[in-house]
Amino acid sequence: MQTDLDRTDLRMLRELQRNGRMPVVELADKVSLSPTACQRRLRRLEDSGVIERYAAVLSPSALGQRIQAFVRVSIERQSKDVAEAFEHAIKRQPEVRACYVMTGDLDFLLHVMVPDLQAFAEFSMKVLIGLPGVKDVRSSLVLDAVKQDEGIPLK
């Protein structure tokens, strides 16, 4: 279900992606609305699910998570049971920050964060390869982030 968004809604969403803690009065000023009208629109965007949640963007390195990797995982059989068992197990791994089901020559793509190479080696060799159905694992370590998540592109 796509929600119909007008130009003001999109302006509000752009501002909130930059600063989700912006007070409604400041947001209203930036999008040329009264605070009451802005609050009403904001509540509609939240209630409709356009705004899923508010969160702080944390610095991985400041919190000791200095190694990031993208890990490609292929599973043994393309069966629903094997895939569900893998998905259930991967959700319990705190090192896995995101997991995507993929098309093409791999089944899952994981975004992994750990403190150091030793932690990555232990996660890869002791945890990941032991998860249900894992057939092949290929990892690429992140050297530098050229562009990071900037939110959802809005028209």
Image (cartoon, rainbow, N blue to C red):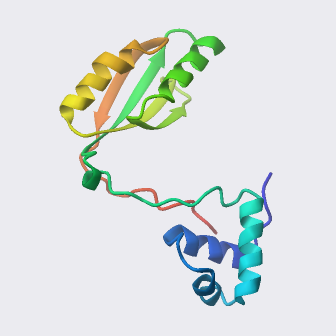
Q: Is residue 26 visible?
A: yes
Asked if 80 appears above or below 62 in the picture, the reply is: above
Q: Is residue 43 left or right of residue 87?
A: right
- Looking at the image, residue 124 lies above or below residue 135: below
Residue at left 77%, top 76%?
40
Whether residue 7 is visible to the viewer of this picture, yes or no, is no
Give the residue at x 48% y 24%: 106
How far across and down, in percent of the image, does residue 13 sit?
A: 62, 70
Viewer-side residue, 34 vs 75: 34
Residue 74, horizontal then vertical, whole percent: 46, 19
Counting every numbered tag in the picture gives 0
12 left or right of 95 in image? right
Check the image and report above or below for 40 versus 133. Answer: below
Residue lying at 55% horizontally and 24% vertically, measured from the top left: 87
Depth order, front residue of 111/19: 19
Query: Residue 7: where, in percent of width, then height?
Result: 71, 77
Relative placement, left or right, of 123 versus 150 is: left
Quarter of the image for residue 96 reads: top left
Which of the image's four quarters has the C terminus?
bottom right
Nearest the camera: 110 or 118?
A: 118
Q: Is residue 44 left or right of residue 67?
A: right
| Residue 29 image position (x, y, % from top left) | 62, 90
